[in-house]
Amino acid sequence: MTENEAAPVLEARGIVKVFGQHRALDNVDFSARRGEVHALLGENGAGKSTLIKILTGAYHPDSGEVLLDSQPITLRDPLHGQSYGIGTVYQEVNLLPNRSVSENLFLGRQPTRFGLVDHQRIDTAARELLARYGLDIDVRAGLSEFSVAVQQIVAIARAVELSGKVLVLDEPTASLDRNEVQRLFEVVRGLKAKGLAIIFITHFLDQVFEIADRVTILRNGKKVATQALDALNTTSVVRMMLGKDVAFEHHPTALA
Protein backbone atom coordinates (compact mmCIF):
# COMPACT_ATOMS: atom_id res chain seq x y z
CA MET A 1 0.00 0.00 0.00
CA THR A 2 1.40 3.38 -0.99
CA GLU A 3 1.48 6.37 1.34
CA ASN A 4 -1.32 7.99 -0.68
CA GLU A 5 -3.51 4.88 -0.42
CA ALA A 6 -2.86 4.58 3.32
CA ALA A 7 -3.84 8.19 4.02
CA PRO A 8 -7.52 8.58 4.94
CA VAL A 9 -9.72 10.19 2.32
CA LEU A 10 -12.41 10.85 4.95
CA GLU A 11 -11.68 11.20 8.63
CA ALA A 12 -13.46 12.09 11.85
CA ARG A 13 -11.46 13.23 14.87
CA GLY A 14 -12.71 13.56 18.41
CA ILE A 15 -16.37 13.67 17.42
CA VAL A 16 -18.84 14.50 20.18
CA LYS A 17 -22.60 14.69 19.64
CA VAL A 18 -25.10 15.30 22.42
CA PHE A 19 -28.88 15.11 22.26
CA GLY A 20 -30.33 16.57 25.46
CA GLN A 21 -28.81 14.53 28.28
CA HIS A 22 -27.73 11.73 25.94
CA ARG A 23 -24.16 11.66 24.69
CA ALA A 24 -24.63 9.84 21.38
CA LEU A 25 -20.95 10.07 20.41
CA ASP A 26 -18.12 10.54 22.86
CA ASN A 27 -14.73 11.51 21.37
CA VAL A 28 -15.03 9.15 18.40
CA ASP A 29 -12.34 8.81 15.73
CA PHE A 30 -12.95 7.15 12.36
CA SER A 31 -11.18 7.03 9.01
CA ALA A 32 -11.87 5.61 5.56
CA ARG A 33 -9.10 4.93 3.05
CA ARG A 34 -9.14 4.79 -0.71
CA GLY A 35 -9.65 1.31 -2.08
CA GLU A 36 -10.97 -0.25 1.10
CA VAL A 37 -14.25 -1.42 2.56
CA HIS A 38 -14.47 -0.25 6.17
CA ALA A 39 -17.28 -1.83 8.20
CA LEU A 40 -18.91 0.13 11.00
CA LEU A 41 -20.41 -2.12 13.66
CA GLY A 42 -22.25 -1.79 16.94
CA GLU A 43 -25.50 -2.69 18.60
CA ASN A 44 -28.58 -0.56 18.04
CA GLY A 45 -27.95 2.74 19.81
CA ALA A 46 -24.16 2.39 19.68
CA GLY A 47 -23.82 5.58 17.63
CA LYS A 48 -23.38 4.26 14.08
CA SER A 49 -26.21 6.26 12.52
CA THR A 50 -25.17 9.44 14.31
CA LEU A 51 -21.58 9.10 13.11
CA ILE A 52 -22.69 8.47 9.53
CA LYS A 53 -24.97 11.50 9.62
CA ILE A 54 -22.06 13.64 10.77
CA LEU A 55 -19.75 12.26 8.07
CA THR A 56 -22.36 12.97 5.38
CA GLY A 57 -23.53 16.38 6.63
CA ALA A 58 -26.95 15.50 8.04
CA TYR A 59 -25.79 16.34 11.60
CA HIS A 60 -23.19 18.80 12.85
CA PRO A 61 -20.81 17.65 15.60
CA ASP A 62 -20.83 19.50 18.91
CA SER A 63 -17.06 19.17 18.94
CA GLY A 64 -14.39 17.48 16.88
CA GLU A 65 -13.76 17.80 13.16
CA VAL A 66 -14.32 16.07 9.84
CA LEU A 67 -11.50 16.05 7.29
CA LEU A 68 -11.48 15.24 3.59
CA ASP A 69 -8.09 14.57 2.02
CA SER A 70 -6.51 15.82 5.27
CA GLN A 71 -8.32 19.19 5.07
CA PRO A 72 -10.98 20.15 7.65
CA ILE A 73 -14.44 20.60 6.15
CA THR A 74 -17.76 21.84 7.53
CA LEU A 75 -20.72 20.18 5.86
CA ARG A 76 -23.99 22.11 5.82
CA ASP A 77 -26.15 19.20 4.71
CA PRO A 78 -25.97 15.94 2.70
CA LEU A 79 -26.10 17.80 -0.62
CA HIS A 80 -23.05 19.77 0.46
CA GLY A 81 -21.40 16.50 1.44
CA GLN A 82 -22.24 15.12 -1.98
CA SER A 83 -20.47 18.07 -3.59
CA TYR A 84 -17.35 17.05 -1.64
CA GLY A 85 -17.58 13.51 -3.03
CA ILE A 86 -19.46 11.76 -0.21
CA GLY A 87 -22.44 9.68 -1.35
CA THR A 88 -24.86 7.53 0.65
CA VAL A 89 -27.14 4.62 -0.24
CA TYR A 90 -29.65 3.48 2.37
CA GLN A 91 -31.53 0.23 2.94
CA GLU A 92 -34.68 1.92 1.66
CA VAL A 93 -33.65 3.20 -1.76
CA ASN A 94 -34.08 6.98 -1.72
CA LEU A 95 -35.13 7.35 -5.35
CA LEU A 96 -38.42 7.89 -7.19
CA PRO A 97 -40.05 4.51 -7.89
CA ASN A 98 -42.56 5.83 -10.41
CA ARG A 99 -39.94 7.55 -12.56
CA SER A 100 -37.81 5.73 -15.10
CA VAL A 101 -34.39 4.34 -14.31
CA SER A 102 -32.84 6.98 -16.58
CA GLU A 103 -34.70 9.81 -14.87
CA ASN A 104 -33.59 8.57 -11.45
CA LEU A 105 -29.96 8.35 -12.51
CA PHE A 106 -29.90 11.91 -13.85
CA LEU A 107 -32.54 13.58 -11.69
CA GLY A 108 -31.71 17.26 -11.31
CA ARG A 109 -29.10 17.23 -14.05
CA GLN A 110 -30.99 16.04 -17.13
CA PRO A 111 -29.52 17.15 -20.46
CA THR A 112 -31.90 19.34 -22.42
CA ARG A 113 -32.51 20.20 -26.04
CA PHE A 114 -34.49 23.26 -27.08
CA GLY A 115 -35.51 23.71 -23.45
CA LEU A 116 -36.88 20.18 -23.08
CA VAL A 117 -35.38 17.11 -21.43
CA ASP A 118 -33.43 15.13 -24.01
CA HIS A 119 -34.71 11.64 -23.16
CA GLN A 120 -32.68 9.99 -25.90
CA ARG A 121 -29.46 11.35 -24.44
CA ILE A 122 -30.26 10.38 -20.86
CA ASP A 123 -31.37 6.89 -21.94
CA THR A 124 -28.10 6.39 -23.81
CA ALA A 125 -26.06 7.75 -20.91
CA ALA A 126 -27.99 5.57 -18.44
CA ARG A 127 -27.30 2.41 -20.45
CA GLU A 128 -23.60 3.24 -20.65
CA LEU A 129 -23.43 4.00 -16.93
CA LEU A 130 -25.23 0.83 -15.82
CA ALA A 131 -23.16 -1.32 -18.19
CA ARG A 132 -20.19 -0.47 -15.97
CA TYR A 133 -22.09 -2.17 -13.14
CA GLY A 134 -23.04 -5.24 -15.15
CA LEU A 135 -26.67 -4.17 -15.57
CA ASP A 136 -28.44 -4.56 -18.91
CA ILE A 137 -32.01 -3.41 -18.25
CA ASP A 138 -34.68 -1.28 -19.89
CA VAL A 139 -33.69 2.13 -18.57
CA ARG A 140 -36.99 3.60 -19.79
CA ALA A 141 -38.98 1.36 -17.42
CA GLY A 142 -40.10 2.57 -14.01
CA LEU A 143 -37.65 1.89 -11.21
CA SER A 144 -40.34 0.06 -9.21
CA GLU A 145 -40.51 -2.65 -11.89
CA PHE A 146 -37.13 -3.99 -10.79
CA SER A 147 -35.95 -5.96 -7.77
CA VAL A 148 -34.59 -4.27 -4.66
CA ALA A 149 -31.12 -5.49 -5.63
CA VAL A 150 -31.30 -3.76 -9.01
CA GLN A 151 -32.67 -0.61 -7.37
CA GLN A 152 -29.72 -0.67 -4.96
CA ILE A 153 -27.25 -0.86 -7.84
CA VAL A 154 -29.03 2.01 -9.61
CA ALA A 155 -28.80 4.04 -6.38
CA ILE A 156 -25.10 3.20 -6.05
CA ALA A 157 -24.43 4.17 -9.67
CA ARG A 158 -26.15 7.52 -9.10
CA ALA A 159 -24.31 8.15 -5.81
CA VAL A 160 -20.91 7.34 -7.29
CA GLU A 161 -21.59 9.42 -10.40
CA LEU A 162 -22.54 12.41 -8.23
CA SER A 163 -19.87 11.92 -5.59
CA GLY A 164 -17.03 9.58 -6.41
CA LYS A 165 -14.71 9.62 -3.39
CA VAL A 166 -16.60 8.01 -0.52
CA LEU A 167 -19.61 5.71 -0.68
CA VAL A 168 -21.60 4.99 2.48
CA LEU A 169 -23.72 1.82 2.30
CA ASP A 170 -26.18 1.82 5.20
CA GLU A 171 -27.71 -1.65 5.67
CA PRO A 172 -27.80 -2.23 1.88
CA THR A 173 -28.29 -6.01 2.12
CA ALA A 174 -31.10 -6.14 4.69
CA SER A 175 -33.78 -6.94 2.08
CA LEU A 176 -31.64 -9.01 -0.31
CA ASP A 177 -31.37 -12.76 -0.75
CA ARG A 178 -28.01 -14.50 -0.92
CA ASN A 179 -27.66 -14.28 -4.71
CA GLU A 180 -28.59 -10.59 -4.66
CA VAL A 181 -26.03 -9.96 -1.92
CA GLN A 182 -23.34 -11.55 -4.06
CA ARG A 183 -24.33 -9.40 -7.02
CA LEU A 184 -24.11 -6.29 -4.86
CA PHE A 185 -20.73 -7.39 -3.48
CA GLU A 186 -19.39 -7.74 -7.03
CA VAL A 187 -20.28 -4.09 -7.55
CA VAL A 188 -18.65 -3.12 -4.25
CA ARG A 189 -15.45 -4.97 -5.13
CA GLY A 190 -15.34 -3.21 -8.48
CA LEU A 191 -15.69 0.20 -6.84
CA LYS A 192 -13.03 -0.70 -4.29
CA ALA A 193 -10.67 -1.65 -7.13
CA LYS A 194 -11.26 1.79 -8.66
CA GLY A 195 -10.11 3.45 -5.44
CA LEU A 196 -13.35 4.43 -3.72
CA ALA A 197 -13.50 4.45 0.05
CA ILE A 198 -16.55 2.41 1.06
CA ILE A 199 -18.14 2.53 4.50
CA PHE A 200 -20.34 -0.51 5.12
CA ILE A 201 -22.93 -0.63 7.90
CA THR A 202 -24.66 -3.94 8.57
CA HIS A 203 -25.81 -6.35 11.28
CA PHE A 204 -24.71 -9.39 9.25
CA LEU A 205 -21.33 -10.40 10.60
CA ASP A 206 -20.69 -13.05 7.95
CA GLN A 207 -21.00 -10.33 5.31
CA VAL A 208 -18.53 -8.14 7.18
CA PHE A 209 -15.90 -10.88 7.07
CA GLU A 210 -16.65 -11.52 3.40
CA ILE A 211 -16.43 -7.97 2.06
CA ALA A 212 -14.65 -5.68 4.55
CA ASP A 213 -10.96 -4.94 5.04
CA ARG A 214 -11.18 -3.12 8.36
CA VAL A 215 -13.81 -2.70 11.03
CA THR A 216 -14.56 -0.01 13.58
CA ILE A 217 -16.70 -1.06 16.53
CA LEU A 218 -18.78 1.37 18.58
CA ARG A 219 -20.38 0.70 21.95
CA ASN A 220 -22.47 3.18 23.92
CA GLY A 221 -21.27 6.09 21.80
CA LYS A 222 -17.57 5.30 22.16
CA LYS A 223 -15.10 3.70 19.80
CA VAL A 224 -13.98 0.33 21.09
CA ALA A 225 -11.52 -0.56 18.35
CA THR A 226 -10.49 -0.22 14.72
CA GLN A 227 -8.77 -3.33 13.39
CA ALA A 228 -8.08 -5.29 10.23
CA LEU A 229 -10.60 -8.10 9.75
CA ASP A 230 -7.91 -10.70 9.16
CA ALA A 231 -6.82 -10.22 12.79
CA LEU A 232 -10.31 -10.95 14.16
CA ASN A 233 -12.96 -13.64 14.29
CA THR A 234 -16.70 -13.59 14.96
CA THR A 235 -16.31 -14.21 18.68
CA SER A 236 -13.84 -11.37 19.18
CA VAL A 237 -16.03 -8.94 17.20
CA VAL A 238 -19.14 -9.84 19.21
CA ARG A 239 -17.17 -9.54 22.45
CA MET A 240 -16.13 -5.99 21.55
CA MET A 241 -19.65 -5.07 20.46
CA LEU A 242 -21.28 -6.34 23.65
CA GLY A 243 -18.48 -5.76 26.12
CA LYS A 244 -18.68 -9.32 27.40
CA ASP A 245 -17.97 -12.89 26.38
CA VAL A 246 -20.73 -14.71 24.52
CA ALA A 247 -20.76 -18.42 23.76
CA PHE A 248 -22.25 -19.64 20.47
CA GLU A 249 -23.12 -23.14 19.38
CA HIS A 250 -22.90 -21.81 15.82
CA HIS A 251 -21.32 -18.68 14.45
CA PRO A 252 -23.91 -15.89 14.37
CA THR A 253 -24.70 -14.38 10.99
CA ALA A 254 -26.50 -11.35 12.37
CA LEU A 255 -26.63 -9.39 15.57
CA ALA A 256 -29.55 -7.06 16.18
Image (cartoon, rainbow, N blue to C red):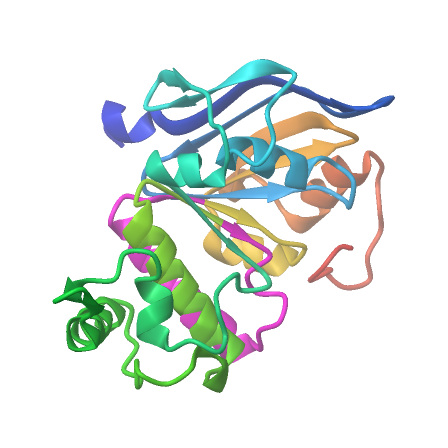
Can you tell which quarter of the image residue 71 is in?
A: top left
Residue closer to the observer: 97 or 11: 97
Q: What percent of the width, then of the height, locates residue 111?
A: 19, 62
Q: Does residue 50 sit above or below 106 in this rendering?
A: above
Q: What percent of the width, then of the height, locates residue 110?
A: 25, 62
Residue closer to the observer: 246 or 82: 82
**Number of numbered callouts drawn:** 0
Residue 96 lies within the magenta run: no
Could one spot residue 18 in this view of the protein? yes
Q: What percent of the width, then of the height, locates residue 33?
A: 38, 34
Name the residue furthest front. 115
Residue drawn where x is 25% and y is 23% of the image: 3
Q: Quadrant of the N terminus?
A: top left
| Apparent side of residue 16 relative to residue 131 in the rendered image (left or right) | right
Residue drawn where x is 27% and y is 56% of the image: 109
Q: Does residue 14 sit above or below 236 in this rendering?
A: above
Could one spot residue 182 in this view of the protein? no
| Apparent side of residue 163 relative to residue 152 in the rendered image (left or right) | left
Q: Does residue 30 sit above or below 240 in this rendering?
A: above
| Apparent side of residue 175 relative to residue 133 in the rendered image (left or right) | right
Q: Quadrant of the C terminus?
A: bottom right
Q: What percent of the width, then of the height, locates residue 104?
A: 38, 67
Q: Which residues are magenta?
A: 169-198
Residue closer to the observer: 118 or 140: 118
Residue 188 lies within the magenta run: yes
Residue drawn where x is 61% and y is 21% of the image: 61
Residue drawn where x is 59% and y is 64% of the image: 92
| Apparent side of residue 26 relative to residue 8 in the rendered image (left or right) | right
